[in-house]
Image (tube, rainbow, N blue to C red):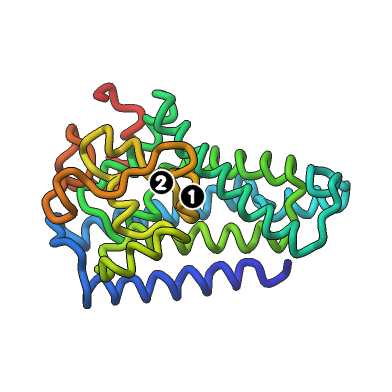
Amino acid sequence: MEDESTIRLGVFLSVLGIMAVWEILMPRRRLGASKPRRWLANFGIVVINTLLVRLLIPAGAMGAAAFAEAEGWGILHIIDLPAFAAIVAAVVLLDCAIYWQHVIFHAMPVLWRLHKMHHADIDIDVSTGLRFHPIEIVLSMLIKIVVVLALGAPMLAVLIFEVLLNATAMFNHGNIRLPLSLDKWLRLVIVTPDMHRVHHSVLRNETDSNFGFNLPWWDRIFGSYRPQPAAGHDAMQIGLPEYRQTRGLAWMLALPFRARD
């Protein structure tokens, strides 16, 4: 799709802008660390990740979808669903795959070393949703490519999924206040900030819960759902117990290779 980059960039900037303003007007929690320093490091990672993926895997998941379509690869080509049904099925199944990817990155020590950079942020806001180690981003893209080829996911489905994943990651990491009555119903169809914030608790049993980024169903189906943090949202500590300071970009990049666990 010729306009893929334009669509993705437009949605990214729009959601980022909305969330940044929302966090100022209606914050959920008081942030403890320097926001400029955190944002400089977190968005520095975004630039590195974008350039690295473009350099190493320029075709990305969209390229894999185009290849699968041209060659007739994948489950969805075999069962020959109507176009709309194939798009919906692909988006849902890709989301399920990302849920399990997230679970595995917590469960396997070598992958946790990469993923814990995301959890080492001692505050949580829209920028945290973009804070992932470059090696994790490359591995994630390779996993998505494998899943796209296995499914034979349509290109439009991959574009919708990629846009949704990026937008919902910023939304559910946002330091925004939603009415509790709205959150109760909204989290039946999408992962809300209050739902995902539990995942960023310093308590490991809470960290290992609420793995979903977009659809909230997988946590309920597979038993990893936790409705609220034990200490409540105002009192809960964010981050990892061993890292209680805001660090710069170089430290974040080196974190997986540090001897300290």
Q: Give the residue at x 53% y 62%.
A: 164
- In the rendered image, the vertical position of residue 185 relative to residue 61, given as above or below: below
Return the x and y of residue 73 as percentages of the image width and height. Answer: 83, 44
Return the x and y of residue 43 as percentages of the image width and height. Answer: 36, 58
Q: Give the residue at x 54% y 42%.
A: 140
Q: Is residue 51 left or right of residue 30?
A: right
* Numbered tag placed on residue 174 in the rendering: none
Return the x and y of residue 185 as percentages of the image width and height. Answer: 38, 64
Q: In the rendered image, which quarter contains the C terminus?
A: top left
Q: As shown in the figure, which amino acid type bears the numbered disc 2? A: Phe
- In the rendered image, the vertical position of residue 66 relative to residue 27, given as above or below: above
Return the x and y of residue 115 as percentages of the image width and height. Answer: 39, 37
Q: Give the residue at x 67% y 72%.
A: 3
**SS of the residue at dot 2?**
loop
Q: Give the residue at x 41% y 57%.
A: 191
Out of 128 and 256, give the one closest to the viewer.
128
Q: Which residue is mark 1?
A: 217
- In the rendered image, the vertical position of residue 112 relative to residue 64, given as above or below: above
Label 1 near label 2: C-beta < 8 Å? no
How crowded pointer 2 is (Cα within 10 Å; few <14, some 14-19, many 20+) is rated as: many
